[in-house]
Amino acid sequence: MRPIRTREPLPVVLAGARGHGRSHLLDIHRLEERGLVRLAGVCELRPLDAAELEGLGNPRQSDDFEALLAATGARIAVLSTPIQTHTELALAAARHGAHILLEKPPAPSYAEFRRMTTGVEAAGRACQIGFQSLGSHAVPAIRRMVEDGVIGELVGVGAAGAWVRDEAYFRRAPWAGRRRLNGADVVDGVLTNPLAHAVATALALAGAPRAEDVAEVETELLRANAVESDDTSAVRVVTTAGHRVTVAATLCAERSAEPYVLVHGTRGRIAFRYLTDRVLVHRDGHDDPVVTGHGRTGLLENLVAHVTEGDPLWVPPEATGAFMRVVEAVRTAPEPRALPAAHWRTEPGESAPRRVVAGIDALVEESAASLRLFSELGAPWAKPR
């Protein structure tokens, strides 16, 4: 694709401006102030009011996405809509000549992912997948450290995510907590949506971001909440290079903790706290870790630079192919098993009761440290392997 160079702000249409979409609205506002983009349209079932649009002018609003694209001449479409709508909306945007920032997960199945990427590529449009953690400058820095042998030979990568979510979280939208809705795949599980960054970032740091880098995927999917999807799960990917990538995650933690990725080497470890872009290098024989902070490139800003100046995309679809192999493994796995009531308890949550799995915080951390699944750690509720 030949980049189109322009000094005019690029017109942007945002589909899905509430909930998580609010963060995209704020990012567009930030780039508007720098003269890089202008908010040309908002696609929502219920129009935004003046307070929600404060500082963003008076963009065209409609619940008809394609009509909005045609009316605004949008050069970029930001899609922050339900998972099961991603493929069709991305293809529609590409047909109308818009480049795309697509919220994660990019699709609910590997087949839909391939259909979307093939169609967008055929239309000659660019697509950036919204894994913000992969815009961190820490990711290439850690990869360089691994390649330079700072922690010896790479052994594997673990990741841990322990978050607290109450029952209202699973009622926030009709598709929340669902594996399917009206016959369509959704696959809204802890590994594929709320803590998907842990999975994608672990695969990137293992040097295995592409679909062809994956040799095998094992899953252990469980749920404490009365929902279809998994809320307490572990996955292990074996890469074609023979490395193990293990991620353990829960939405039923005793207390919320900052998620992290742990790169294991023969002579040390590197911890990446991807919400704050901090890197901690633990080398054998050294008492204290070396701690560094890193910058981050915003994914919409990078997409604008790609369209106008030809800068490489930080998160093109092929960089999320391995993650989509994990989504597919979760989608095709047996239904998540309900944890026995003896192993979880109910506590007050922020706006509704929440369910807490006993001892899960320690198990999640031990999984990242040992590259083992819950069943291999002796969790009493995990099915023996």
Image: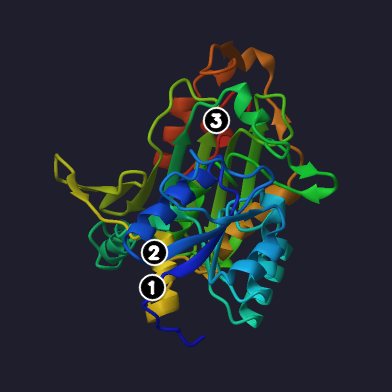
Nearest the viewer among 44 and 101 is 44
How many angstroms separate mark 2 from mark 3 (CA)?
Answer: 31 Å
Q: Quadrant of the C terminus?
A: top right
Q: Is residue 156 visible?
A: no
The reply, left or right, for residue 367 in relation to residue 121 is: left
Pointers 1 and 3 in contact (C-beta within 8 Å): no
- Badge 2 marks a residue whose secondary structure is helix
* Quarter residue 374 falls in: top right
The reply, left or right, for residue 363 in relation to residue 143 is: right
How many angstroms separate mark 1 from mark 3 (CA)?
Answer: 36 Å
The residue type indicated by label 2 comes to Glu
Nearest the viewer among 225 and 374 is 225
**Precedes in sequence: disc 1 or disc 3:** 3
Residue at 49% x, 45% y is: 53
Query: Dot 2 surroundings within 10 Å: few (below 14), some, or many (20 or more)?
Result: some
Nearest the viewer among 8 and 156 is 8
**Relative image position of residue 345 (x, y in whole percent):** 59, 13
Please state which of the two labelled residues, at mark 1 or mark 3, is closer to the viewer: 1
Q: Which residue is mark 1?
A: 305
Residue at 56% x, 42% y is: 18
Count every numbered label the image shows and give the total: 3
The residue type indicated by label 1 comes to Ala
365, above or below 255, in the image: below
Residue at 54% x, 32% y is: 250
The residue type indicated by label 3 comes to Leu
Q: Which residue is mark 3?
A: 251
Q: Which residue is mark 2?
A: 301
Pointers 2 and 1 in contact (C-beta within 8 Å): yes
- Badge 1 marks a residue whose secondary structure is helix
**Precedes in sequence: disc 2 or disc 3:** 3
- Badge 3 marks a residue whose secondary structure is loop
Please state which of the two labelled residues, at mark 2 or mark 3, is closer to the viewer: 2
